[in-house]
Image: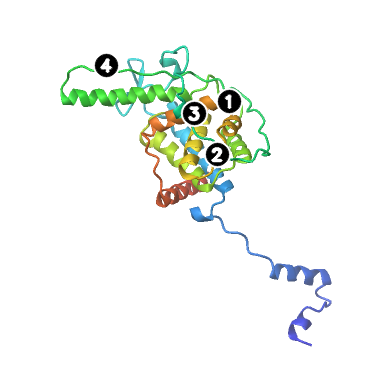
Amino acid sequence: MSVSTVLLQPTSAFSSATVHSLHLLAHARPPTPPPTSMADLSPAEALRLLAAGIRSTLALCDPSSTATSAVDGKIQYDGVAQVISPQSLPVPPMSPPLAPQDMPCKADVSPSATPAPPVPGALSQMSPGCEHVSTFTSESPADQSDRIAVDKMNQRAIISRRFWSKSAPEIDIEKYLLRIHQYCPISTAVYLATSVYIHQLCMVTRAMALTPLNVHRLVLAALRVASKNLEDINHQQKRFAKVGGLSEQELCRLEIGFLFLMDFDLKVDIAILEAQAGLLMELERIGR
């Protein structure tokens, strides 16, 4: 009889149940370590990190916690006048029509996919956009540079108005992201790129402030643009718009507006995504 057999024999000190428990503990798998890099992240984990990053950006973009000053009915960020409220801009009769060539192409998606229920709340109640036309006059190079900068800020403010809803949707942003992930699953890289884009818009260039009134539309447009930028196969425009609670035309307008806000600079590489993943993991760790 071997030594191991003798050790596993029930004695007066150890019952059969105790020996069986020790055997299970000896062969139990070690706990799965938390992800430490982008390669270890699943799409669901990346989605959770994206939601955490959006919550942090919402807190930082809260006007009550940002140093602002009112000048001529506008809000100043670091001395640059910027409109951040939809009530401070004129309301045109309707949004400009979308040209056929601006319509994104539809990709092949299985027609038997599970249909998405309607989004609750007022997400589809849009605030119409409008166009800004600047006049040109003879001016010095310095004045021209200042005018271009002001025109660009005004254009961004007008474009960002398209992302405002009349009232905050009933569905919170976490459940909204889970809904998109359930009916239109996307890759880990797309979720991280979306976080990069939102951070660039709201924290770096400050093209617009993230609020409960625009976060759903901005995230939806960012996800769609990032998906088209990084993935070869995408969900149909009609399906993605329905899951997001918008029409196809309105989603197209948001995508185009998002591209202008980003200055069409959508380049992300593995180093940028890795750095963003590390930042989001640290934010999540601090928030626990």
Residue 41 point in image, percent of width and height:
54, 52
- What residue do we see at 54% from left, 46% from top? 187
Cα gap from disc 1 to disc 4, whole angstroms? 38 Å
Of mark 1 and mark 4, the one earlier in the sequence is 4
Cα gap from disc 2 to disc 1, whole angstroms? 29 Å
Q: Nearer the viewer, mark 4 or mark 2?
A: 2
Q: Give the residue at mark 1.
A: 169
Under mark 3, the amino acid is Cys
Extreme-top residue of the structure? 93
Of mark 1 and mark 3, the one earlier in the sequence is 1
Under mark 1, the amino acid is Pro
Vertically, is 238 above or below 185?
above
Tag 1, which secondary structure?
loop
Residue 192 point in image, percent of width and height:
48, 45
Task: Bin the neighbour count of mark 4 within 10 Å (Cα to Cα): few under 14, some 14-19, many 20 and up.
Answer: few
Extreme-front residue of the structure? 100
Residue 122 point in image, percent of width and height:
58, 22
Q: Give the residue at mark 2.
A: 107
Under mark 4, the amino acid is Thr
Under mark 2, the amino acid is Ala
Q: Which mark is residue 135?
A: 4
